[in-house]
Amino acid sequence: MREGPLAELFRATEAAQRQAQDATGEPAPGEAATPEPSTKGSARRATPAAEEPQEQTVEHVPDFARAVDEPATEHVTEPATEAISAAPPAPPSSPESAPRERPYEPPASRFLEALPEPAPRLEYATRPDSTSYLAVIRVVGVGGAGLNAVNRMIDAGISAVEFVAVNTDMQQLQLSDAPVKLHIGRELTQGLGSGAEPDVGRRSAEEGYDQIKNALRGSDMVFVTAGEGGGTGTGAAPVVARIARELGALTVGIVTTPFRFEGSRRKSSADIGVEELRAACDTVIVIPNDRLLEVLDRSTSMLDAFKIADDVLRQGVQGITDLITMPGLINLDFADVRTVMSDAGSALMGIGFATGEDRAKQAAERALRSPLIDTEIVGARGILLSIAGGEDLTLLEVNDAAELVRQAATDDTNIIFGATVDERLAGQVWVTVVATGLGGKGRGRPVPSIGGSGSRTTGRDDPLEPPSFLRS
């Protein structure tokens, strides 16, 4: 349908033109006026052919000049005068009766006239789209493990998140469900992968710098997910994170480290990759796959073990994004998440799930005792707490879970939590705990020293105790 204010303007203009034409009797613009027949010319054509020699005495004047000059009847001989007098008398030529020349005006020219300026508004006019703005969140899967994690997130139906797949292996990239696929290292690897060489992955990402930057432009928050120890995930993930931070996005890395059975060489490459990623991100959450062995049954197949590792990446991303994008009992905005995760360095994540009686408390306890948290969260500078449940989730349950987490932290810890409602989680409670700024890992933020001069970088806000040999 093209109905709207412009169509109404066209109709009003056409109606005004018709009214003006009816009042003045003038033809509509673009219509040719019917010329009046010239009586002089008709009289001349009506002269008998036998009297043709007498026309030599007539001064031939063009028809267009006769309208403004005096009639040349005195130069016509008597027989010609009688022939002319037999015709109806011609109307006297005067400036008033002469046809007026009107410049041609296209019908559409009136529609192009500028509309009058509206009256100024004295009250504040809000933007119509100001209330519908949402933070632009993108999840970038780098390498094989990153692409697998992205596929699981898409299958889980994570809302209001855009997915990007980045890989050097063209065959694996084509199998990704991400709507945006970036093939990097086209000239370097010929689409055959990095060969488990992190340097090849890094150079491939640098080769695709422009396409990565264009894909991430406009992001408010970027998750970089990968599996450390390989070639593309280890080498390219820090480059992707650095580009995201250059664009001003809050950058969070969520990566897994190899299982023990994958070998020491892969473990060494993973350690180097984690350090490089930590230097490029605001926050890095490391999920040690080896610790999953503590909760897996001995009959668990290797394929299922890797699926569980990929699903942990998905849970970590979803636990954070749901706080921002989904409605809930206690809503958070993007600024709250940025407060906890900006320049936070290393972070740990625990996930708990429970059903039945005291489900919220049990889920919180399992999240705090998660094997993925390899240390106490007492030293955490910030904690992001996500509680998700169905429509039967109560405020008292949210309070019970949050109280357990608060007791595990210190009074100085900045705890930001939210509770989201998802109708698909009927009877369930999920608790995700992300502890940031732990134990001096990562960059951390400058904290004033005890004496007040200078600064130090640490993961704790409380003063450091002096060494034992300095104590009195």
Image (cartoon, helix red, strand yellow):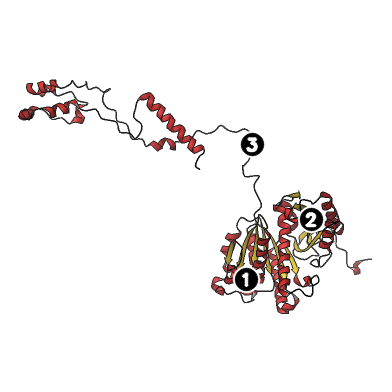
Q: CA distance from mark 1 to mark 2?
A: 45 Å
Label 3 belongs to which residue? 124
Residue that appears at 81% across and 50% down: 394
In depth, the one of 2 and 251 nearer the eye is 2
Q: Is residue 211 left or right of residue 346?
A: left
Residue that appears at 50% across and 39% down: 3
Q: Kindly state the secondary structure of the residue where label 2 is placed.
A: loop
The location of residue 70, given as percent across then percent down, is 18, 23
Give, as a three-letter code, the residue at label 2. Gly
Q: Kindly state the secondary structure of the residue where label 3 is placed.
A: loop
Q: Residues within 10 Å of mark 2 (few under 14, many from 20)?
A: some
In this rendering, the answer to whether 470 lies above or below 355 is below
Specify which label sits upstream in the sequence, 2 or 3: 3
Specify which label sits upstream in the sequence, 1 or 2: 1
Label 2 belongs to which residue? 427
Q: Quadrant of residue 267?
A: bottom right
Q: Kindly state the secondary structure of the residue where label 1 is placed.
A: helix
The location of residue 454, given as percent across then percent down, is 79, 59
In depth, the one of 41 and 269 nearer the eye is 41
Q: CA distance from mark 1 to mark 3?
A: 51 Å
Q: Quadrant of residue 14?
A: top left
Label 1 belongs to which residue? 202
